[in-house]
Amino acid sequence: MKLSKIARMLSPSQSSHTHLSSASAYQSSSLLLLVSVLSRKRNHSKNNTTIRTAFRTFSKTTQASAATSSSLSNSSNSNNSHERRRLGQKQKQRREHNSCCSTSDSNRKPLIEREYSNSKNRNNNSESTVFQRSSKEELLRWKSWASKKILDNFRSTSTTTTTSVSSSKDEKNYDPLDASSLHTELEWLIEDVLVNNDTNDSNNNNNNEVKMRMDFNALTALWEKRIDDRYPIQYLTNSSQFRTLLLYVAPGVLIPRPETELLIDFAEQHLKIYGKKPHLKDKPWLDLGTGSGCLALALAKELELSKVYASDFSEEALDIARINIERLKVEDKVTLLQGSWFDALTDNKNVFLTSATSGKEEEEEEENKNNIKFAGIVSNPPYIPSDICANKLQPEVGRYEPMSALDGKGDNGMGDLDIICKSLHKFLLPGGFLALETHGGEQALRVWETLWNTNLYEDVRVRSDFSGVDRFVTARLIDTKKVDSYKNSISH
């Protein structure tokens, strides 16, 4: 794969420190384009050392601007008005998405895995793979039009920003698109649309012909929606890269971010040291708030864990996670649970039994299902402070990604994190590992302090993301006697 083609990982809506609408955030994403390109190659190699090194090198040059962006936290809009506006727009956004992107069962997969199906093919119920055939000249003309649209948009938004942003109360309406990022997104889009871009393909009798997964009318509608409506490219193509995994994503789930991949790195480091301990070996892990299923799937596929549970409150998110579980063929490893945080583990509607258990094992699991313990728990919960969610998110994020997966609520976005930290010890085995993603900075320190003050955890650490932001907190649960003592103390 050529280096000139982009990965889907770091468009302006992808990096956590570019959640905020600011020019410096877009400068950051532009500087990291090379890293985006390298990350796409993960599908073809398990060696990520070069990619990670490049990511850290480029990220250091943008750390200062990222920190400046993250300091923006004041909002003139109330949370109530923001919530009403968000709910009012939700149905409209779903209709707009459906009008541009087919949601039929055949298209509930990433664009690059689809086949083009015209009306003739559907009427004949043909099972053969059919693609739209076009000439290279037509494709080049379309690409020229798409590139011109980027230029026209850049000029118009630059003028609007200069004349209007200073007096605007809603800055996100004037947050300009980054032209360089759009050009690389265009290359990536064409790469996914083309069935085979190799002119030396022996099966291609006409070297001037290209096979496409959608016709030019659909492709034009998609690109106009990306630029005019600021619709995330990941939702338009229903695809997002997470480590070595290509995932199906849709508006019901958060688009996986590159820094979240580090949670899997931390889990892998823990397993190398403690994973073979008898009381932890082959015990299940838990992904809280799974969304697209990215963390649970990486634990099962990359770290080869035999059993992973993945919970989410949203039925829509679980439906999308289920699609990815089936696509990646890990139904025997990953079990979905519905519920709010740890409530998903105690709700009777969730079934913990798998087809692999029977007889006495089944009875034991049924008896102990409300006391299930995990060798590890990972989570990327909502953590963005509500005032930032109300006004300071990028359009791609604030308008389309589920607010329930972004807004941490509570004091400084700590609402969901506080709930998780309060109950973690009840569901971890002694020596069990936990890794949480946070908004970084003060929030990460508060999570660290909360865990440390319980005296239930050892090796409690704050860890940095690729940009040097203190974003993660990891720890291990200590021995059972101290845990039981803590339970008794808080019950009185």
Image: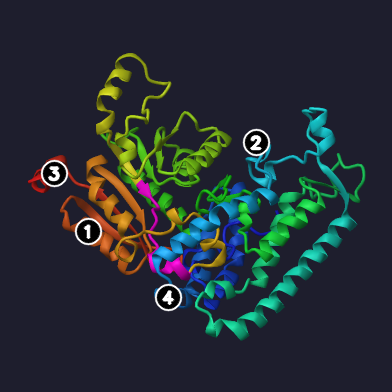
As for residue 388 lying within the magenta part, the answer is: yes
Q: Earlier in the sequence, mark 3 or mark 1?
A: 1
Picture disc at residue 450 = 1
Amino acid type, mark 4: Ser
Relative to the observer, which residue lies in front, 367 or 357? 367
Q: Earlier in the sequence, mark 2 or mark 1?
A: 2
Estimate the spatial distance between the alpha carbons at disc 2 and disc 1, rounded to whole Å: 45 Å
Identify the element where label 1 is drawn.
helix
Q: Earlier in the sequence, mark 2 or mark 3?
A: 2
Q: Earlier in the sequence, mark 1 or mark 4?
A: 4
**Residue 290: where, in percent of width, then height?**
43, 45
Q: Residue placed at 33% from the left, 54% from the top?
A: 416
Q: Which residue is mark 4?
A: 76
Relative to the observer, which residue lies in front, 64 or 227? 227
Q: Residue furthest top?
A: 359
Picture disc at residue 487 = 3
Relative to the observer, which residue lies in front, 28 or 254? 254
**Residue 481: where, in percent of width, then height?**
11, 41
Estimate the spatial distance between the alpha carbons at disc 3 and disc 1, rounded to whole Å: 16 Å
Q: Which mark's residue is nearer the viewer, 2 or 1?
A: 2
Q: Earlier in the sequence, mark 3 or mark 4?
A: 4
Estimate the spatial distance between the alpha carbons at disc 1 and disc 4, rounded to whole Å: 31 Å
Amino acid type, mark 1: Thr
The magenta segment:
378-392
Q: Which mark's residue is nearer the viewer, 1 or 4?
A: 4
Q: Which residue is mark 2?
A: 105
